Image (cartoon, rainbow, N blue to C red):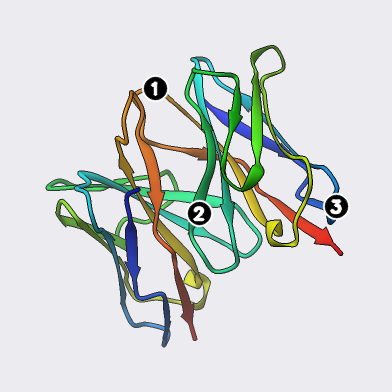
Amino acid sequence: AQSVTQLGSHVSVSEGALVLLRCNYSSSVPPYLFWYVQYPNQGLQLLLKYTSAATLVKGINGFEAEFKKSETSFHLTKPSAHMSDAAEYFCAVTKQGAQKLVFGQGTRLTINP
Amino acid sequence: GAVVSQHPSRVICKSGTSVKIECRSLDFQATTMFWYRQFPKKSLMLMATSNEGSKATYEQGVEKDKFLINHASLTLSTLTVTSAHPEDSSFYICSAPWRAGGHYNEQFFGPGTRLTVL
């Protein structure tokens, strides 16, 4: 079985500061990992994905994430937060050939001016 | 990229009525679609997998007679909430996988439907 744990249901940072959203996974097979962003009353938009290629993955809007097998982690970072980054972020896991996604609990990111 | 639409985006209904929500893949065919439910400030809970031309597969604890799913074509899946009650009020999101390239299916999500049952 696969699972995802996002540490911190709410993260608050100042505009211009580093953003770090934590995600740890559990999987008995090599995982595929995703980060999604959700703005209020909207669906999910893919930020970036890891599918067993490069362990450092760059996504949209300046976000990136690093797959660390030894730590079973896939933390999301952005060097400098922007007010428009305020949203809900979800980490998700699946496996090769599968279609179902297993989501973490989500982390609400707040940006302080 | 692939686009998934949902209709309606928002619906308010009286208790006891049924509500149908449509999920369409606009520029690709989807033999499988997924339906999620999201409570306020909570994560997405997978309700069921919609399979074109066959019965849907429901997750444990989801009432199949309450949440009827029909996947009649390769671009349309519908979720009908039957005899809706206030506790069914939620945000419902669908997704469809599309093999963009390579060896994995990327999920494309609809914009969601906000259901309020009075």
Residue kind at label 2, given as amino acid type:
Leu
Q: Secondary structure at mark 2?
A: strand
How many numbered discs? 3
Q: Is residue B118 above or below residue B4?
A: below
Q: Quadrant of residue B75?
A: bottom left
Residue A13 is labelled as: 3
Near-viewer residue (B82 or B9)? B9
At 64% from the left edge and 49% from the top edge, which residue is drawn? Answer: A89
As measured in the structure, the alpha-carbon distance from the residue carrying label 1 to the one carrying label 3 is 35 Å
At 50% from the left edge and 54% from the top edge, which residue is drawn? Answer: A44
As measured in the structure, the alpha-carbon distance from the residue carrying label 2 to the one carrying label 1 is 21 Å
Q: Secondary structure at mark 1?
A: loop
First in sequence: mark 1 vs mark 3: 3
Residue kind at label 1, given as amino acid type:
Gln
Q: Which residue lies under the disc numbered 1?
A: A96
Near-viewer residue (A101 or B55)? A101
User: Few, some or many C-alpha atoms within 10 Å of disc 2 (few <14, some 14-19, many ≥20)?
Assistant: many
At 61% from the left edge and 48% from the top edge, which residue is drawn? Answer: A61
Q: Position of residue B18 (x, y in %)?
A: 31, 77
Q: Chain of mark 2?
A: A
Q: Which residue lies under the disc numbered 2?
A: A44
| Mark in the foreground, 1 or 3 | 3
At 43% from the left edge and 59% from the top edge, which residue is drawn? Answer: B93
Q: Position of residue A92 (x, y in %)?
A: 55, 37
Residue kind at label 3, given as amino acid type:
Val
As measured in the structure, the alpha-carbon distance from the residue carrying label 2 to the one carrying label 3 is 22 Å
Q: Is residue B103 above or below residue B50?
A: above
User: Which residue sits furthest top?
Assistant: A70
